Image (cartoon, rainbow, N blue to C red):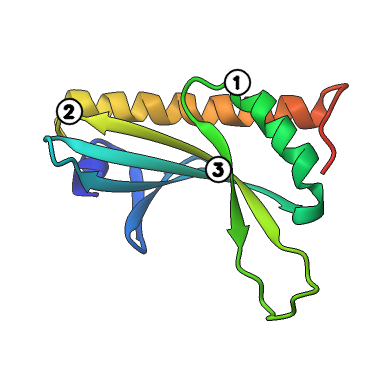
Amino acid sequence: MDALQESGMSVEAVEDGALVRDGETRVALFAEKDHQGGVIVRLHLDLDLYVEEDSLPDILMGMNLMNQGLDYGALNLDPVEADTEDDDVPVTFAVLGRSVLWLRDLGRSELDRLREHLRRFEAEVTETVERTLHGSKGMSA
């Protein structure tokens, strides 16, 4: 986190990672030491999109098509924990953008590469989802 803040990023600690803010965009970063050297950084972008389990066949087909055009990440579904223990309530899934980046170290050039990856990842995922949802052949969920 210190290296990210020193490089000019707006960062705050969350659970076992960090939340990087750029304008209204928030990307969660989770870093771990790579056993072969360097650092593995996992990026999670919450899109505030939710789907219920009865929509999964259509959603999975649409996400598969959208993922084919992504270079810097992928869209995934994460189950949202239910507030109740009721078995009749359908399971809800959050749509998340995810990416992984390996850094040699936390030096200036590698943090610049991380910053560029973050920018491209967020722009690419957001553009793909918005184009799909607002396009003439928009996905309905």
Disc 3 secondary structure class: loop
- Residue under circle 3? 24
Between residues 8 and 125, which one lies in front from this camera angle? 125
Disc 1 secondary structure class: loop
**Tag nearer the camera, 2 or 1:** 1
Identify which residue is drawn at 75% across, 55% down.
53
Residue 42 in the image, given as x and y percentages of width and height: 36, 42
Disc 2 secondary structure class: helix
Mark positioned earlier in the residue sequence (2 or 1): 1
Residue 21 in the image, given as x and y percentages of width and height: 44, 44
Between residues 48 and 102, which one lies in front from this camera angle? 102
Callout 2–callout 3 Cβ contact below 8 Å: no
Marks 3/1: CA distance? 26 Å
Callout 2–callout 1 Cβ contact below 8 Å: no
Identify which residue is drawn at 58% across, 30% down.
125
Mark positioned earlier in the residue sequence (3 or 1): 3
How many other residues sit within 10 Å of disc 1, few (<14), some (14-19) or many (≥20)?
A: few
- Residue under circle 2? 108
Residue 68: assigned label: 1
Left/right placement of residue 126 relative to residue 131 reads: left
Residue 86: assigned label: none
Between residues 50 and 62, which one lies in front from this camera angle? 62
Identify which residue is drawn at 53% across, 32% down.
74
Mark positioned earlier in the residue sequence (2 or 3): 3
Q: Amino acid at mark 2?
A: Arg
Residue 140 in the image, given as x and y percentages of width and height: 85, 38
Residue furthest toward the bottom? 85
Q: Amino acid at mark 1?
A: Gln
Quarter of the figure with residue 139: top right
